[in-house]
Every structure is written in structure tokens, then in C-alpha cells.
Image (spheres, rainbow, N blue to C red):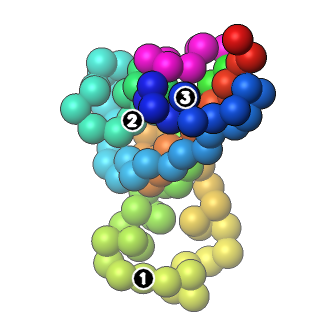
Amino acid sequence: MRECHRTVKPDGVALATVPSLGRLGSREADYWRFTPNSVRYLFEQAFHPSALTVEPYGNIVAGLAFWAGMGPDDLTRDEPDERDPTHPCTVCVRAVKRPS
């Protein structure tokens, strides 16, 4: 994360997506895989917490469709767009580098 922070210009933005396919339990300290909390923790090592936006995207239907090799035509239009924070498929990050 420090290298990512170093390469971004002041007021620049780092965008990242990481896979997070799996059910999130009630444990906030699940740092053994990419979860919204673990990704936030990683980025906070270099970026100021107030300069971060961390959002989970996806749901169980989108995750199952991915594992089954289904495509967009196999789902209704709204199914993959619903967001379920307990079953994210990806975690997206927007990190702004504050000027020194």
C-alpha cells in the first residue's frame, strides 16, 4: 500500500477492486481474506481513513452464477445488480492521496 500511495500524485486517486466471493459472518475481525474491513485496514496503512471509500458489490445470486459459469443472459436484468453486504463478490476502493 505504501508503494501504491507513493506512486499516486497529490490529490490523485487510486482505484482498486479485489475479489471477495464468500459469505461474511458477524465477525468484524475477518482479516484472512478480502472483506470490506480487511481491505479498509490494508489501505489505511498508507492512506488517511477519511480519504477512503470502500464498498462491497454483488450478492449470492451473482456469486453462484460466477461459480456455475453462467453469463448475463442467464440472469434477470436486476439479479446481478442487487447489493447484499453479507455476500459481496468484489470490494471496490477509492483512495485519495492528500497533498503533503
- At horizontal 45% and vertical 25% (from top left) the residue drawn is 2
| Horizontal side, residue 47 vs residue 25: left or right | right
Q: Please, what is the three-letter code of the amino acid marked with disc 1?
A: Met
Single out the mark in the foreground, 1 or 3: 3
**In the rendered image, which residue does mark 2 sit on?**
35
Q: Are marks 2 and 3 in contact (CB under 8 Å)?
A: no
Q: Please, what is the three-letter code of the amino acid marked with disc 3?
A: His
Say few, some or many: other residues with alpha carbon within 10 Å of mark 3 (under 14 / 14 to 19 / 20 or more): many
- Helix, strand or loop under label 3: helix
Residue 32 appears in the rendering: yes
In-front residue for pair 86/36: 36
Q: Please, what is the three-letter code of the amino acid marked with disc 2?
A: Thr
**In the rendered image, which residue does mark 3 sit on?**
5
Q: Is residue 45 magenta?
A: yes
Q: Please give the range of residues in magenta.
A: 44-50
Tag of residue 50: none
Query: Where 75 sits versus 80, above or below?
Result: below
- At horizontal 70% and vertical 11% (from top left) the residue drawn is 100
| Horizontal side, residue 8 vs residue 6: left or right | right
Location of residue 13 in the rendering, given as x and y in whole percent from the top left corner? 69, 37
Say few, some or many: other residues with alpha carbon within 10 Å of mark 2 (under 14 / 14 to 19 / 20 or more): many
- At horizontal 64% and vertical 61% (from top left) the residue drawn is 81
**In the rendered image, which residue does mark 1 sit on?**
70
Residue 26 quadrant? top left
Q: Which one is earlier in the sequence, the residue at label 2 or at label 3?
A: 3
